[in-house]
Amino acid sequence: MSEMLAIQQLRVELPSADGWRAVVADATLRIGSGEAVGLVGESGSGKSMCARAAMRILPDRARVTGTITFDGESVLDMGARRLRSYCGEEVAMIFQDPSVHLNPIRTVGDFLTEALRDRGVAKHVAYERAGSLLSQVLIADPARVLSSYPHQLSGGMQQRVMIAGALAGEPRLLLADEPTTALDVTTQAEVLAIVDRLRRERGLAMLFISHDLELAAAVCDRTVVMYAGRTVEEQPSTALHRDPVHPYTVGLLASRPHIAARQPRLDVLPGRPLAAYEAPPGCPFAPRCAHVQDACREQVPPLQEFGDGAVACRRAAELHPSRVTERVDA
Amino acid sequence: MSASPLTAASPRGAGVVLPQRVRGAARAIVARLGVSGIAAALLLVFLTVVAVFAPDIRPQDPDLVQLGSTFAGPSSAHWLGTDQSGRDVFSRLIVGARPALLGPLLVVVLATVIGSILAIASAWAGGIIDGIVGRTLDLLFAFPAILLAILAVAVLGASLLAAVIAVGIAYIPYVARVVRSEAVRQRTLPYIAACEAQGQSPARICARHLLPNLLPLIIAQATVSFGYAMIDLSALSFLGFGVQAPAADWGEMVAAGEPGILLHAPVESISASFMIVITVLAFTVLGERLGAPAGRRV
Amino acid sequence: MARLLAMRLVGAAVTLFVTSFVVYGALFLAPGSPINFLVGPQSATPAMIRRLRAEYHLNEPFLQQWLHWLGGVLHGNLGYSIVEHSSVLGLIGPRLGTTLLLIAYAGILTIGFGVLVGTVGGLRPGKVDAALTTFTSVGLGVPQYIAGVVLITFFGVAWGLFPTYGSGSGFGDDLYHLTLPAIALAISGAAYVSRLTRAAVREEKAKEHVITARARGIAPRSILRRHVLRNAAIPVITVSGLTVAGLIAGTVVVETAFGINGVGALLVQSVQESDFPTVQAITLLMVAGFVLVNTAVDVAYLALDPRIRARQGAGR
């Protein structure tokens, strides 16, 4: 599988009253062509910022270091013109809350045909294409929706419009930033099903960002876990769920309530999640880790290969001896 | 589990003079007001002191007519020169601070008290009453303050009182609109529902709970309104409809000094204009720092 | 949509109705009898008194009097000025052109400068924006008549760049004479418009749908035009309209300061002369202008923002 998007040691800082604040400290992830990768973490873990960095849509004042390559080409060094063709035609993004991501004073048709019309496509042709896109996201009455304004549509419809808009440029990679978080549960399932189907039909690669481990696992082949702006673990989804390595992932999975069992108390991780700039020196999870040692607090553990994936924990081999020799049979 | 570095106490040097609470409050005020806000507040305090003690501070008799030296330029005898009747401009400027500040004060008190009561009652009652009050205030909005004041003056004769009452009434809808929208928002908050559940009467809830929470906004709005009231009232004095000559008032002095401009002796008009502008700016800056909404009455 | 439009127009009509009531009724708040008040300092001959009684229908109930007057106004009869021995319309007519020109001139300056300065400040944060903000803050605090006086002092008398009094003859000369007054009238309004424009542009620029457009590879120029400015135009147009409405009342002080023979100056003159019919008529005219501009802005807002149509349809 050829590598499509590669993010290496990404660091994103934003200016604040107290100087530069890191929101992403050290993120590393890869997406192969056609592959679906889940990016999981709590709020403040920096996952959204990673995706936005990959599309260069961070706030103008942000400072970005590290490497992001797409098909070998450095995204961070792209010129304005190349960037415009990159966004939309090679990579596209769908956002969390569609109601604020659609211009409220423009119709859906205007939104969908905007990029095409800018490139010189004739209006009626563009509108036809927009209509067919809406059909593909299972919108029953494309003509009516094309002439509607966002506020006239339900949340689920708005998100489908957003998906249609993302697919309009026929991208090869889809970045989905918590696309179902703002929707109610039934709609979530519908929208997810649409995204999944379209992805498979078109052979799209996808980065699926979520705070919900299980949701990500359901849709993605591999899962990357972030904490305090760092990649802490990366594994095939099934392996991650069966046997998580990093103490944070272990804690996350353990804290889920079991539907069948009765628990007097939920197992929770002590403390609270940190943003990258709040992390102490050394391993960011050290203050909350049950297996912490002095060495952990001194230096940040690097992300190292482990089993079929990678983990950033000094004690990984020690705590999971059986995984060290695991390999996927070719 | 180790203590988070976020909660560790930061050491402070020795030499605490004021008790903790006062220092904390002072720091909060400084942070809120900022440099510009504090400068504005100091200026206003200074002007208030000048206005209160005006008769004792002024160097010369502001009403002393000396027809031999009209529109004289600044000199050691008259720091800002003389006006059309040879009166000392500097003294008149000091004495003029009184009506210049008193007028807007009355306007603001009138508009704020009535406007706030209407707004709170209307926000609380909701429904038809809110609708009626809203419609009535909408009608009042149609009257620019100056026009209402001119109408009042035409009918009742030129005086500061007529101008004050008219402008005060014209400002009610602006105050009411700002206070009402916040009152409506507060009304839906849980703490009000809690009071209602306890069986407190609406009047009591409004007075003891709603009002104190609205007070910062009301004060900020009143501060900004002070500035605009000053603009309108001084404009009326400029037209000859407010403070009547020979009493000194900044707006009136701007008008009275106009003939001097053509004679290349603009000091009276310019100095009075300057006083008005910096006072209005001080009120506006202070009000905005206190949190008045950025809207301005046109 | 048509229903909302009708509601706005009806609202405006009601406002004007009630305003005329207030303006007319003010007459009766005056101390002394209306006749004495109307006659004012003049000595009243019995013929004059009879004429006034008839004109003002003072023998009839108040409501009818008011309706008579209002009916007259709607037919172009604004009353008769005893003081000036002329129909009020005859007094206002010749002066109306000058005042309207002044308002238009000031309006163009207000909106033109206000929107320009505000847009630049909103799009380019940093030193430029800080400087502009300081300027506009000062501009907000300067009353129109003071702006006039200061302009006269420096640009008129001291440096002799512009004429200081009167309204000139001929269109070009008119504009020359009205330049300083128009600037005086426009300064605080322009400051306000620029403040709000800057805030609106800033706000729109930071909105999420702008990020969506960037993520779709749309050209920055297009984004600016279609998503930032077009969206910001809605509050900007609203504010501009309201500010222009405010210029109407401002003509009173500015015309007085500059000695321009316009409707505003006539109002002041009529008050000084106790010429109440003229005061009534001009006050009503100015309020009517104010209400009409506000209503036009309301209607424009309806047309521009699709969300309002949906929201308003369900009630306030």
Image (cartoon, rainbow, N blue to C red):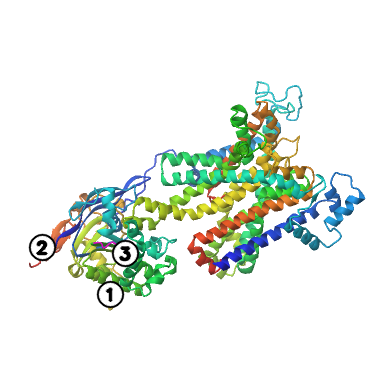
Tell me residue C230's x, y (percent): 45, 54
Tell me residue C71's x, y (percent): 75, 60
Is residue C117 visible in the rendered image? The answer is yes
Q: Chain of mark 2?
A: A
Residue B292 vs residue C274, the one in the foreground: C274
Q: Quadrant of the N terminus of chain C?
A: bottom right
Give the CA separation, mark 3 to mark 2.
33 Å
Specify whether disc 3 shares its chain with disc 2.
yes
| Amino acid type assigned to the residue bearing label 3 in the image | Glu
Specify whether disc 1 shares its chain with disc 2.
yes
Residue B111 vs residue C145, the one in the foreground: C145
> Of discs 3 and 1, which sits in the foreground?
3
Q: Are marks 3 and 2 in contact (CB under 8 Å)?
A: no
Say which residue label 1 marks. Answer: A258
Q: Which residues are magenta?
A: A167-171
| Amino acid type assigned to the residue bearing label 2 in the image | Val
Label 3 secondary element? loop
Q: Mark 1 packing: few (<14 Cα in 10 Å), some, or many (20+)?
A: few
Say which residue label 3 marks. Answer: A178
Say which residue label 2 marks. Answer: A324
Q: Mark 3 packing: few (<14 Cα in 10 Å), some, or many (20+)?
A: many
Magenta stretch contains residue A169: yes
Magenta stretch contains residue C120: no
